[in-house]
Amino acid sequence: MWEQDYMPVAGNLLYSTLVAAVPLVILFYMLGVKRKPSWIAGLSALGVALVLAVGIYGMPAPQAGASMVYGAAFGLFPIGWIVIASLILYRVTVDTGKFEIIKDSIGSLSDDRRLQAILIGFAFGAFIEGAAGFGTPVAVAAAMLTGLGFSPFYAAFICLLANTAPVAFGSLGIPVVTLSGVTGLDEGALSSMTGRLCALIAIIIPAYMVVVMSGFKRAFEVLPAILACSVTFAGVLFYVTNTQGPDLAVILASIAALAALVLVMKVWQPSQIFRLEDDVEVSATRKTHTTGEVVSAWSPYILLVAFVLAWRYPPIQAALNSVAGSFPVPGLHETIMRVPPITPDPSPYAAVYGFPWLSAAGTSCFLSAFAASLLLGMSPGKFVGIVGAVLKQLSKPLLTIASVLALAFLMNYGGMTSTLGLAFAATGSLYPFFSAMLGWTGVFLTGSDTSSNALFGTLQVVTANALGLNPVLTASTNAATGVMGKMISLQSIAVAVAATGMASSQEGRLFRVTLKHSIILALFMAGVTMLFAYVLPQFVPQG
């Protein structure tokens, strides 16, 4: 059995930390400086990590290979499976023409730019984040706002600012599922704490957006809409994440917020319609649809909610789990010894791969997509074509997910993550602050809350344990504060620019405009994390 060595370079923590950080530096350099595709960056960092794990840390090659295979497999299932299924459902809605009806049903409720930003940029964008994620919400919402007369630049900016609170639970909760998988912490505890932090973000963001658009004074003119959106979204998000889990949290919260906004706008409109200086004139012609058409358009997501809730019902869940498979990873399970100070006593490192093929959230999403295709009259051949197109579309994103998870698992089992954790423990009582900024940096550089959680989740736990902090708080902070880095990630900005038809030269300008808001909000969440760590620790669940 191989024992991990956390200071392999001359027994020195500083030198060992510099070595352990090299794969992450390579990853960030390839993404941020060389502007390479994320899958190339992920594979490059993985190759470097393998050389260091075997050559410097002394990890046996068989265990190194097995840990990478384990991580890649976890990346493809259950994580990749959720991505595939959610995008299939989205494509069924688009290809049947129902998504245009969904957009029409919410795009004509008000001519006020502040209300349109809250309704489409925040609430509807959150819905798309929960259902599809991975850049889709910014693309869809920004294109919609541009179609309503926003300047392309401002539409992109507002949607980047709005796409924060929902990100930690995007694509049926993938970031939290990943965080639980790499840290071993209870998924329910992580869902609860991340939900508490993100509910606070959801209270702030709609008002913050409107203040940025119109100033404090004019923001009060639409206070009823701001409160309807933020309080409803935050309340439902808090309840679902603390009682049901991460899967449907953002979908249900966004639907509730959309419904609340629709009800408010039916009976109230601001006394003065607010416009932006650089608005673009658009045709006033708008399509109207019957109630039946609107319900039919939303039916795929109604089915999704029904399927996921059924999958969460304890008797059904127990029956589905009865056919789930799990097995020790050959050549890795309990062949590596974790030693103090990472663990109180030497203990073998478990490696058990679970394959809940029927009870996985991705399966419920896929079945809802198939049922929706039948309900909407799509032929089986067309549905199969969509599945093929989605698999082709996601080939490189899936490779990215697999490579990043392989990197994370290799660093975990090789001891490199523990080295970094011991180094961060040197920050002492200030670590909760740095914990938040680490999550922010991870999403900024990788463009993905899921990837950031995979890379830094175990690091957050190791450091928290070394400092006597609750690891659920630091791990959840990685997810919740990480969302503030989403608006300035290169991938998000590129998607926003492309969706609104701007020239790629506008990416730098868009980055500069969003950067200060990203930093302000990240620093705020860092302060909140310090508050939970030292003033309100009783409100942090145990993992």
Image (tube, grey):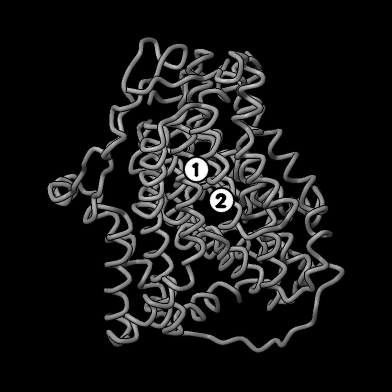
Of label 2 and label 1, which has the lower sequence position? 2
Q: Is residue 274 among what the camera can see?
A: yes
Disc 1, SS: helix
Please name the residue shown 38% across and 31% down the image: 185
Q: Is residue 476 above or below residue 172?
A: above
- The disc placed on residue 42 is 2
Please name the residue shown 46% across and 37% down the image: 410
Q: Quadrant of residue 71?
A: top left
Q: Is residue 476 among what the camera can see?
A: no
Please give the count of numbered marks on the rendered protein.
Answer: 2
Q: Residues within 10 Å of mark 2 (few under 14, many from 20)?
A: many
Please name the residue shown 27% across and 84% down the image: 380
**Cβ atoms at labels 2 and 1 below 8 Å apart:** yes
Instruction: Specify the quadrant that holds the N terminus.
Output: top left
Q: Residues within 10 Å of mark 1 (few under 14, many from 20)?
A: many
Q: Quadrant of residue 374?
A: bottom left
- Image location of residue 217, percent across then percent down: 81, 49
Q: Is residue 264 left or right of residue 511?
A: left
Judge by depth and name the residue closer to the eye, 239 or 96.
96
Q: Is residue 365 left or right of residue 160?
A: left
Q: CA distance from mark 2 to mark 1?
A: 8 Å
The residue singled out by tag 1 in the image is 407
Please name the residue shown 51% across and 40% down the image: 50
- Image location of residue 276, percent across then percent down: 82, 67
Judge by depth and name the residue closer to the eye, 455 or 124.
455
Judge by depth and name the residue closer to the eye, 60 or 417.
60
Judge by depth and name the residue closer to the eye, 30 or 171.
30
- The disc placed on residue 252 is none
